[in-house]
Amino acid sequence: MKKVMTLIAIPFIGVAIAGAMPAWADGLTGPQGNAARSAEQYLSISGFSRVGLIKQLSSAAGDGYDVADATVAVDSLNIDWNMEAVKSAKQYLSISGFSCKGLTNQLSASAGDSYTPSQAAYGAKQAGAC
C-alpha cells in the first residue's frame, strides 16, 4: 500500500495594527531592519558612537552586515549621540581613572570610540571627568 502525503496550503494573513511595527521598520529592507534590531540590542548594553556602531554592525568580527545596510539602519534610529557618549564615558570611568583630556581623546579617537569632538567633550563633562 502506498502512502500519500497531502500538503495543505494555509494562506498567511497579516494584520497591520497601528503602532505594532517598530519605528525602524518603515521603508527598510530585511537586512536593514535586522541591522537596526542588532543596533538597538548593542545600544541597550553599551554606549556607541554612530561610526562605532556602524563598524560593529558591518565588521567581519561583528555582525557582518553590508556597510550600506548598517549605515541606513543606524541612521533610521532616533539616537541621542551625546547621551551615548555619556554612557561610554561613564563605562570608562567605572573601570579606570581618566583626566578630562584623556577621556575626551579616548572617546573621539578613531582607534577608540570615534565620537565627534563635541560629543566626546559632552560625554566627558557629563560623566564628571571635567
Image (spheres, rainbow, N blue to C red):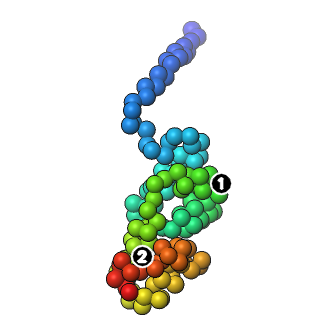
**Residue at the top extreme of this rendering:** 1
Secondary structure state at the residue bearing disc 2: helix
Residue under numbered circle 1: 68
Q: What's the residue at 34%, 83% (across, down)? A: 128
Residue under numbered circle 2: 123
Q: The residue under label 2 is which amino acid type?
A: Gly
Q: The residue under label 1 is which amino acid type?
A: Ala
Q: What's the residue at 47%, 89% (across, down)? A: 101
User: Foreground: 14 or 129?
Assistant: 129
User: Foreground: 20 or 65?
Assistant: 20
Picture coordinates of residue 7 (x, y %)? 54, 16
Q: Is residue 112 above or below residue 49?
A: below
Picture coordinates of residue 56 (x, y %)? 56, 64
In this view of the protein, can residue 64 be seen by the observer? Answer: no
What's the CA distance linking mark 2 and mark 1? 27 Å
Q: Comparing marks 2 and 1, which lies closer to the viewer? A: 2
In this view of the protein, can residue 39 be seen by the observer? Answer: yes
Image quarter in which the C terminus is found: bottom left
Q: Is residue 9 above or below residue 96?
A: above
Q: Is residue 119 left or right of residue 127?
A: right
Secondary structure state at the residue bearing disc 1: helix
Dot 2, how many residues are within 10 Å of its Cα: few (below 14), some (14-19), or many (20+)? many
Image quarter in which the N terminus is found: top right
Q: What's the residue at 44%, 56% (across, down)? A: 41
Q: Return the mark for residue 77.
A: none
**Residue at the front extreme of this rendering:** 118
